[in-house]
Image (cartoon, grey):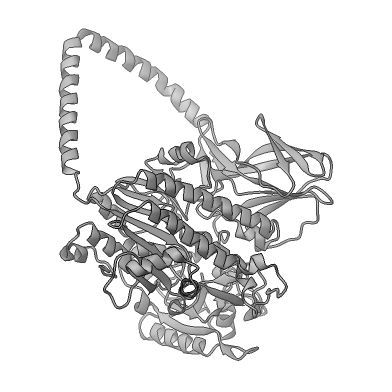
């Protein structure tokens, strides 16, 4: 996983027809009344015909259902259990296994295999987990970066979710392994896999993961209410509101944007009253509800309902963290999640599965990236509060896994855990003495927190092993490894300095986000995302000036060579490990949408947050002073993932693309059938 809050879009907007709907309903009411009268008269005069016809139709339906059930029987009678532990480093894993600190990982190794797992290029979580699910490279799946551009407008958007016509659309353009298993009627359970929003119709159950937005339609926008000074900060994942220091305060809970016919879209708001009880607690009142909040404690789940129109409403759930009351009032309100009992859009298959989970384990985070890393970066909540949130997220996910394991008889079960990734993102600074934010005298707890979470992953595996038998196949994998993020590299600044990116004003030193101010009639290349470079190609980009063919190829070669010579002057070390041309790493039906060049950074260096959104700061490299201090956005060959399995594999090199064909071979697919799937990997067993 990468981050929760870079969001070029403004979320979704709900269209409300209001009075138009009422007028329409009134206009057809008379027609319905007339139809009802005639239908009643017909039924009354033809009772025997109606009864006989109904019985015949029922018999035909029952017969068809019976035939369908016979055809849907499947002979696969074993269990395949796959655990996705995001971001486990093979170096850390191997070291801890050698020291005997991961006994359950060692057990799998002894029974089968422990291997370094080649990740995708680029080594981003949405790209890698899509490769895991499909067995195909980004040129086939269409998922190749967190940020993508529209060549017709140069506009940017997030790639992990897609709204069209007011409804979420499938992001992955290829078939996932759970669709193949469902075709064969193999019971299939998928819990939280990234890029599964909206959910697929599997032969079993699916809960969507990364890509499920908050109720605003963003990937996570918190709100923060304070009586203290508010400093402007462009890099934020939330909205900060001022409040008075009085005993009673009024705030607004912010809901989805609604656009009425002929009107401007506005966010629906629910007013709430905050009453200060004493220096350690307050009461929040709204919609006839009352919740008590204590200082430095998370609230229970709080419920809210937003009216979106005459017949439409959105139900949400959220948590509060009362940072302090004195000397300054500070209240953090989490992104408002879809209420899983009645989500605005389906987040599970069957649709009622999300509610069933509530009935079994209680309310839970539905937002695809639930842990609020940006609130920590912006110092709205501290590490203590953040770790409590991470604990809650993994408790919920483990409860889902336990529920499914207890009723899992045969088939395929996958469960995704993102916590190991997030912990390393936020706490790597405690284990790297060369990181700008390293604290030599920090607490032992924080210095050991990363390894403690590796142990927690090992404990989860141990619990799974206790509920399985020797004939069950268990696969553990991480999508990529991890390492330190010390320096932020501004790729657009490098392109500007080398004459490839030009701004409208001759004196422009700093370009704004979203490629604002770029003179496209003089620009040859630009960067977005976490290493993607696009040529401003004639006939593809709206104002492209570089001619396809020899001119474009020469330009790519020139940029690549110069990038390989980019050094951090302070330390005289190369910033970049490799520069990949499109044809090296992307192939398939969607390769024409992929970047022309992709940068593989050396360990310690990473494309900046500003680069991701197409901004151009006035420096080339700067210290990473954010608490988000670990990363995997390096040259993929430097950050492989891991594979553990209780079944011995025979391949020399293993790739994340090998998992999907391996699952299908286990359930009975022949070599010929696997070839027809057009996988970029091959079966391990």
Q: Residue at x 57, y 82 (%)?
A: 494
Residue 211 lies, with reference to residue 344, above or below; the image says below
**118 relative to 434 in the view: left or right:** left
Q: Is residue 293 above or below residue 397?
A: above
The answer to whether 157 is drawn above or below residue 600 in the figure is: above
Q: Number of marks in the image?
A: 0
Residue 486 % position (x, y) = 61, 77
Residue 590 seen in render: no
Q: For this rendering, which residue is in front, 541 or 138?
A: 138
Measured from the top left, where is residue 343 in percent x and y? 48, 40
Measured as percent of width and height from the top left, residue 176 is found at: 32, 57
Determine whether, in the image, residue 53 is placed left or right of residue 416.
left
Quarter residue 379 falls in: bottom right
Give the residue furthest to the top. 45
At a point 35% along the width and 79% down the height, the residue shown is 584
Q: Position of residue 480 (x, y in %)?
A: 45, 70
Q: Describe residue 668's horizontal placement relative to residue 555 as left or right.
A: left
The answer, for residue 459, to whether it is visible in the render is yes
In the picture, which quadrant includes the C terminus?
Answer: bottom left
């Amino acid at each position: 996983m990468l981050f929760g809050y870079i969001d070029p879009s403004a979320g979704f907007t709900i269209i409300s027809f209001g009075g138009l709907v009422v007028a329409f309903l009134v206009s057809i009411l008379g027609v319905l009344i007339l139809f009802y009268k005639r239908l009643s008269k017909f039924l009354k005069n033809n009772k025997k015909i109606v009864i006989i016809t109904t019985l015949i139709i029922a018999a035909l339906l029952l017969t068809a259902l019976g035939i369908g059930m016979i055809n849907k029987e499947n002979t696969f009678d074993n269990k395949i259990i796959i655990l996705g532990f995001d971001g486990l480093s093979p170096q850390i894993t191997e070291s801890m296994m050698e020291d005997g600190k991961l006994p359950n990982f060692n057990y799998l190794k002894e029974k089968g295999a422990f291997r370094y797992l080649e990740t995708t290029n680029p080594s981003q979580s949405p790209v890698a987990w899509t490769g895991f699910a499909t067995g195909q490279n980004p040129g086939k799946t269409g998922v190749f970066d967190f940020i993508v551009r529209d060549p017709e407008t140069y506009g940017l958007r997030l790639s992990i979710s897609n709204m069209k016509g007011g409804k979420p659309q499938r992001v992955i353009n290829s078939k996932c392994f759970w669709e193949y298993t469902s075709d064969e009627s193999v019971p299939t359970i998928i819990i939280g896999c990234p890029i599964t929003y909206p959910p697929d119709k599997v032969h079993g159950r699916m809960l969507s993961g990364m890509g499920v937005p908050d109720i605003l339609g963003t990937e996570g926008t918190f709100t923060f209410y304070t009586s203290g000074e508010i400093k402007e900060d462009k890099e934020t994942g939330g909205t900060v509101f001022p409040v008075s220091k009085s005993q009673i305060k009024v705030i607004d809970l912010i809901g989805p944007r609604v656009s009425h016919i002929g009107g401007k879209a506005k966010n629906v708001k629910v007013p709430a009253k905050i009453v200060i009880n004493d220096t350690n607690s307050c009461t929040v009142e709204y919609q006839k509800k009352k919740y008590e909040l204590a200082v430095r404690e998370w609230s229970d789940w709080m419920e809210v309902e937003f009216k979106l129109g005459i017949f439409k409403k959105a139900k949400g759930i959220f948590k509060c963290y009362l940072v302090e009351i004195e000397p300054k009032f500070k209240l953090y309100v989490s992104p408002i999640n879809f209420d899983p009992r009645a989500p605005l859009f389906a987040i599970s298959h069957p649709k009622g599965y999300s509610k069933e989970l509530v009935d079994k384990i209680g309310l839970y985070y539905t937002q695809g990236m639930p842990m609020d890393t940006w609130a920590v970066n912006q110092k709205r909540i501290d590490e203590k509060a953040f770790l409590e949130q991470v604990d809650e997220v993994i408790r919920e996910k483990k409860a889902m896994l336990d529920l499914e394991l207890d009723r899992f008889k045969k088939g395929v079960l996958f469960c995704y855990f993102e916590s190991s990734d997030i912990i390393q993102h936020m706490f790597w600074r405690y284990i790297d003495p060369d990181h700008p934010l390293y604290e030599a005298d920090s607490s032992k707890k924080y210095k050991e927190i990363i390894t403690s979470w590796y142990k927690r992953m090992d404990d989860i595996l141990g619990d799974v092993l206790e509920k399985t038998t020797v004939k069950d196949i268990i696969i553990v994998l991480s999508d990529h490894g991890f390492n330190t993020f010390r320096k932020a590299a501004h790729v657009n600044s490098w392109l500007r300095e080398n004459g490839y990116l030009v701004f409208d004003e001759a004196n422009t030193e700093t370009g704004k986000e979203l490629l604002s101010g770029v003179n496209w009639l003089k620009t040859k290349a630009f960067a977005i995302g976490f290493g993607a470079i696009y040529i401003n190609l004639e006939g593809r980009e709206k104002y492209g000036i570089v001619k396809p063919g020899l001119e474009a190829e020469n330009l790519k070669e020139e940029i690549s060579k110069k990038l390989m010579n980019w050094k951090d002057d302070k330390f005289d070390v190369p910033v970049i490990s490799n520069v990949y041309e499109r044809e090296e790493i992307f192939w398939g039906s969607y390769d024409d949408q992929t970047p022309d060049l992709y940068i593989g950074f050396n360990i310690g260096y990473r494309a900046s947050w500003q680069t991701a959104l197409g901004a151009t700061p006035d420096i080339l490299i700067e210290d990473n002073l954010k608490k988000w201090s670990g990363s995997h956005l390096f040259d993929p060959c430097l950050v492989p993932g891991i594979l553990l399995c209780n079944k011995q594999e025979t391949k020399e090199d293993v790739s994340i693309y090998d998992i999907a064909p391996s699952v299908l071979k286990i359930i009975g697919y022949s070599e010929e059938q696997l070839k027809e799937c057009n996988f970029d990997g091959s079966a391990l067993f």
